[in-house]
Image: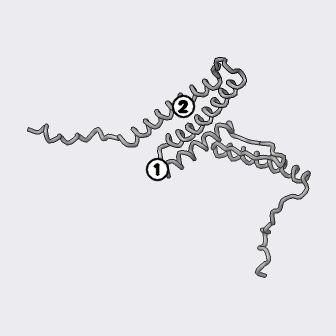
Amino acid sequence: MENEPKKGKQKIEMQLIESERARAISFSKRKKTLFQDAEKLATRSGDEVGVMLFSPGEKPFSYGSTSIEEIIDKFLKVKLEQRDHAEGKSVGFGAFKDLRKELQELNEKERRRILMYKIMHPGSEIPSDKHMEEKKVAMLLWVKEILNETKSAILSKHFKFDLNVLPEPEEHESS
């Protein structure tokens, strides 16, 4: 009696489908149902909904009630802010860490490009790499944006003044 399933609901044991063809068919049907359910949720709740998955053949599929890319960006931004807030860091520090890593990678690529050019064209002047320069300008603009966001966050959190309260006069001002 104790091991028998309750009436009405039986527990179904989930297992990997052994046949690749059957697994592909199941994936296709379940993917369609999952995307339909995601669309219903987005429509009924008015929320942004995104679903990403890979087929058994490693082909990517996605559904987004708006742009899946925008949903991913928003999700990652919020998660980064939550993590940084929980760790007591400014949002800008995480972005600076990512930026520093990207800059190191760019500098390494540039160093290898210059070395290869010197080997292939000894004595020639090394031409500039317009693509690399564009990336560095984009990174500089990103740094400025992060700085502005960080300044705004600091000012809004740490310098809230109550304009209805007069400051106490300093000692040398009193006569």
Q: Residue at x 78, y 46 (%)?
A: 54
Total marks shown come to 2
Mark sitting on residue 88 = 1
The colour scheme is: one colour
Front residue (pair 67, 90): 90
Residue depicted at x 65% and y 32%: 109
SS for dot 2 = helix
Height in image: 60 above or below 4?
A: above
Q: Quadrant of the C terminus?
A: top left
Instruction: Tell me which numbered mark, 1 or 2, is placed earlier along the sequence.
Output: 1
Look at the numbered discs 1 and 2 and tell me whether their residues touch, using CB distance below 8 Å.
no
Q: Which residue occupies the extreme bottom position in the image?
A: 1
Name the image quarter holding the N terminus: bottom right
Q: Nearer the viewer, residue 93 or 67?
A: 93
In screen coordinates, is 135 left or right of 9? left
Q: Amino acid at mark 1?
A: Gly
Q: Which label belongs to residue 142?
A: 2
- The residues bearing labels 1 and 2 have C-alpha atoms spaced at a distance of 22 Å
Q: x%, y% of residue 10?
A: 79, 69
Q: Quadrant of residue 64?
A: top right
Kind of residue at disc 2: Trp
* Badge 2 density bin: few <14, some 14–19, many ≥20, Cα 10 Å: some
Task: Tell me if 80 is positioned left or right of 149 in this view.
Answer: right
Residue at disc 1, secondary structure = loop
In the picture, measured across the screen, residue 15 lies left or right of residue 69, that is right
Q: How many residues crowd around disc 1 within 10 Å: few (fewer than 14), some, or many (20 or more)?
A: few
